[in-house]
């Protein structure tokens, strides 16, 4: 099946839409804090600021903590506190999905430039490694029987 290769970690590509949504959300929250400070006083604004730090930490954790690791005979996808582990032998295919929306469920992909991994009995996981070509080459080296759709798209 796969030769013993050292673990490789690939960070997620981050789409401009994700960053824009994150910045817009934070700007709206900060504007609300300023308005609270003006209307309710500095103490209320400070209380809201502490809550905002906790709430803002979650998307930042997702942003900084989304990556994909090929380690031995498994793929580990992480996104903040969430984790998916897929045995490489169970992967039945990889394809570049078309369209804006994924076919059900959430996935650790922070970009619309994605790869959809099929595994098990009809399961799918969508990921967005920053360097898709290198990720796919590494995946192929570990799982030689892998079927990749849209062969013209990938090396």
Image (tube, rainbow, N blue to C red):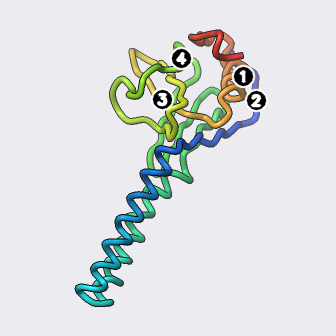
Marks 1 and 3 in Cβ contact (< 8 Å): no
* Label 4 crowd bin: few (<14), some (14–19), many (20+), radius 10 Å: some
Residue denoted by label 4? 95
Residue denoted by label 1? 137
**Distance (Cα) linking label 3 and label 4:** 9 Å
Residue drawn at the location 52% of the way across and 45% of the way down: 16
**Distance (Cα) linking label 4 and label 1:** 14 Å
Closer to the N terminus: mark 1 or mark 3?
3
Residue denoted by label 2? 5
Task: Give the camera-side residue of 68 and 121.
Answer: 68
Closer to the N terminus: mark 2 or mark 1?
2
Marks 2 and 1 in Cβ contact (< 8 Å): no
Marks 4 and 1 in Cβ contact (< 8 Å): no
Closer to the N terminus: mark 3 or mark 4?
4
Mark 4 or 2: in front is 4
Residue denoted by label 3? 126
Mark 2 or 1: in front is 1
Tell me where residue 76 appears, x and y as whole percent: 56, 36
Give the secondary structure at mark 4.
strand
Location of the C terminus by quadrant is top right
**Distance (Cα) linking label 2 and label 3:** 24 Å
Give the secondary structure at mark 3.
strand
**Distance (Cα) linking label 1 and label 3:** 17 Å
**Distance (Cα) linking label 4 and label 2:** 24 Å
Closer to the N terminus: mark 4 or mark 1?
4
Location of the N terminus by quadrant is top right
Give the secondary structure at mark 1.
helix
């Amino acid at each position: 099946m796969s030769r013993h290769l050292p673990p490789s970690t690939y960070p997620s590509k981050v789409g401009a839409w994700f960053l824009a949504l994150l910045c817009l959300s934070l700007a709206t929250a900060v504007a609300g804090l300023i308005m609270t400070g003006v209307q309710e006083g500095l103490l209320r604004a400070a209380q809201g600021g502490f809550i905002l730090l906790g709430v803002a930490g979650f998307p930042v954790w997702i942003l900084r903590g989304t990556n994909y690791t090929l380690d031995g005979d498994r793929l580990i996808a992480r996104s903040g506190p969430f984790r998916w582990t897929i045995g490489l032998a169970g992967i039945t295919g990889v394809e570049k999905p078309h369209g804006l929306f994924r076919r059900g469920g959430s996935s650790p992909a922070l970009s619309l430039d994605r790869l959809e991994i099929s595994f098990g009995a009809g399961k799918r996981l969508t990921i967005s490694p920053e360097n898709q070509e290198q990720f796919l080459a590494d995946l192929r080296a570990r799982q030689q029987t892998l079927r990749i759709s849209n062969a013209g798209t990938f090396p």
